[in-house]
Amino acid sequence: MGPDKRRLWNPVVETLSRDAMRALQLERLQRQVAYNASRSPYYRERMHWAGIAPQDVRSFEDFAQLPVMDKDEHRRVQQRSIDEYGSPLALIGCAPREAIVRINATSGTTGVPTLYTLTARDVAVVNEMHARKYWRAGIRPGHVMLQALSLSMFTGGLPLSQGIMHLGACVVPVGIEGGLRRVVEFAQLTRPDALVATPSFATQLVEQGALGAPASTLGLRWFFSAGEPGGSEPGTRRLIGEGLAARVYDHTGGGHAFHCISCEAADDGAGMHFVSEDHCLLELVDPATRAPIPLAESAVGEMVFTFLDWEGGPLMRYALGDILEYHERPCSCGLPGPRLRIVGRADDMLIVKGVNVYPKAIQQVLLEFAPRVTGAMRVLLDAPGPAVRPPLRLRVEHGSGLAGGELDELEAALRQRLRELLRITPRIEWVAPGSLPRDAHKTRLVEISR
Ligand SMILES: [Zn+2]
């Protein structure tokens, strides 16, 4: 029996078989590539230099011959566009000015914002992606969702409010500008079913309570985690879930085409369900060489995405620097589609004896050994990465009450597991529980230490 269709916003698309989805993607990709080349001088030029005409793209492999575009490249073309045409969008925009109803920026807070545009049809696509996510989690018309995120054009701002309204639920876009107190006041007045916020905000709410009462008295049934990775970390999920007496979901996706949400099987290690495959072609590449990595169970690489069936400013083979682990194995929740786990940032990558290693992935393996370890750790480098002179050195906090022989045994098991999963054999230096400094959610896992 297939998945329960009432659990899905768009059951026709969301239950397509793998082959049918790939066929739909390829058809849309070919159309999108031809559209981009015909509308954007920049994409036309890029394809010309790569020696590929739109009609040459007959497969995903053909398409992967085109160069990857990152934010630096995006900034360069935007500046060139301003210099040559007096508009940041002239070279890369694909729709006429009167068709553009929203200008967004790709996420990130450093440097000049990199813009992309949406037509009314693109906005409708984004709205549907938000609706697909919340619908899967059980949100229906009649539910009230308190949106306590920065109300900007970035992830979690206006596009998210519009998406909630599109589903037919009621959004209370309180924002976080008025602080925790303001959010709690609105929660007590509007009695929301769901809260959308960062995991650090939710942690603060659990710890400080709701104006003198436990946070669980707010009556929240769902917590949707956004903007930071904590919502996928079992410890943080447990703390928030118990503190709010709510189900915790992690999700990603703002004003663009890439959207994911977790499910009841969130702690099985395979990450979030990818819900926007029909509008977002996902590829993985090696962050160092940008060579394609085939999409196969447990493949890890830098995410490269391409908007499909998109009119305004379709991003094509675009890399934002996120490292993903890809999973195709069926999920125990019964919902379809591949799942993705975000394992780090391309900037964090280390290379040990030719093997790409991400500090967050090491920590993930470490957490399997809790409570014999606390989960706190550092990768110690002699010099800045990515190249590391082996052996890789780790400083790891052991759990309380562990000593001598038990530590030796734990070390052997941990090294064995790291070798199996990540192909590294690190040197481990044990430290007492609580001895590594913690900074809530922004702790750097890498330290330069001679
Ligand atoms: Zn699932």
Image: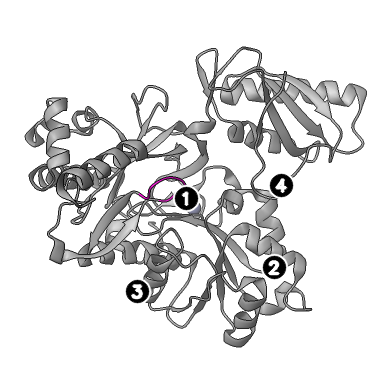
Residue 323, horizontal then vertical, whole percent: 47, 36
Seen at 70% across and 31% down, the residue is 378
Quarter placement of the C terminus? top right
Q: Residues within 10 Å of mark 3 (few under 14, many from 20)?
A: some
Query: Rounded to the nearest whole Å, what is the CA distance between mark 3 and mark 4?
Result: 37 Å
Q: Which residue is mark 3?
A: 166
Tell me, for residue 9, which label it has, or none.
none
Q: What amino acid is found at the position of numbered circle 4 in the picture? A: Asp
Disc 3 or 4, which lies upstream in sequence?
A: 3
204 relative position to 101: left or right: right
Q: Is 364 in front, or is 94?
A: 94
Span colored in magenta: 107-113
Q: Are marks 1 and 4 in contact (CB under 8 Å)?
A: no
Q: What amino acid is found at the position of numbered circle 1 in the picture? A: Thr
Q: Which residue is mark 4?
A: 439
211 relative position to 84: left or right: right
Q: Nearer the viewer, mark 3 or mark 1?
A: 1
Q: Nearer the viewer, mark 4 or mark 2?
A: 4
Residue 144, horizontal then vertical, whole percent: 51, 79
31 relative position to 375: left or right: left
Disc 3 or 1, which lies upstream in sequence?
A: 1
Q: Quadrant of residue 182?
A: bottom right
Query: Rounded to the nearest whole Å, what is the CA distance between mark 4 and mark 2?
Result: 17 Å
Tag 1, which secondary structure?
A: loop
Seen at 67% across and 76% down, the residue is 181
Tag 2, which secondary structure?
A: helix
